Image: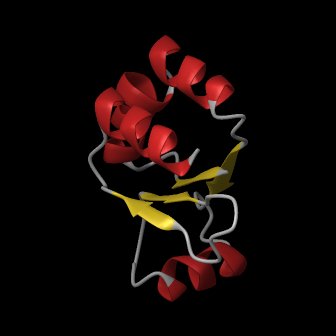
Amino acid sequence: MLINFTADWCVTCKINERTSLGSAKVAAAMEAANAVYLVGDWTRRDDAITAELERHGRSGVPLYLLYSPGSPEPRILPQLLTEGVVIEALGEAG
């Protein structure tokens, strides 16, 4: 499961979504990994999302969490994504 914590006003989030998370190559890697993609929209500063951000040492977005089968803790992906980073992480999570 890949969780994208984002907000409409977050420029970095929008760039990552256009250049990396929304690419056809990443979509294919998500399908190959049988991964679920979830979005946590923090545009209006939701308290539950704020708590999750803080739990992972963040005060804001973006935050990308990749949960792997059998692993209780997620892998935190970098704030600046590339297709390669996401595809590699999905492959390792398999």
Q: Nearer the viewer, residue 84 or 3?
A: 84
At 69% from the left and 39% from the top, the residue drawn is 35
Look at the image and tell me in which quarter the C terminus lies.
top right
Residue 84 image position (x, y, % from top left): 31, 30
Residue 55 image position (x, y, % from top left): 53, 87
Q: Quadrant of residue 67?
A: bottom right
Relative placement, left or right, of 11 versus 91 is: left
Establish if 28 lies above or below 1.
above
Residue 7 image position (x, y, % from top left): 52, 52
Q: Quadrant of residue 15?
A: top left
Q: Nearer the viewer, residue 77 or 42?
A: 77
Establish if 47 lies above or below 93.
below
Residue 40 image position (x, y, % from top left): 65, 57
Point out the residue furthest to the top here: 24
Relative placement, left or right, of 45 versus 86 is: right
At 39% from the left and 28% from the top, the residue drawn is 20
Establish if 36 lies above or below 1.
above
At 42% from the left and 32% from the top, the residue drawn is 87
Relative placement, left or right, of 92 versus 3 is: left
Q: How is the image coloured?
A: secondary structure
At 60% from the left and 79% from the top, the residue drawn is 52
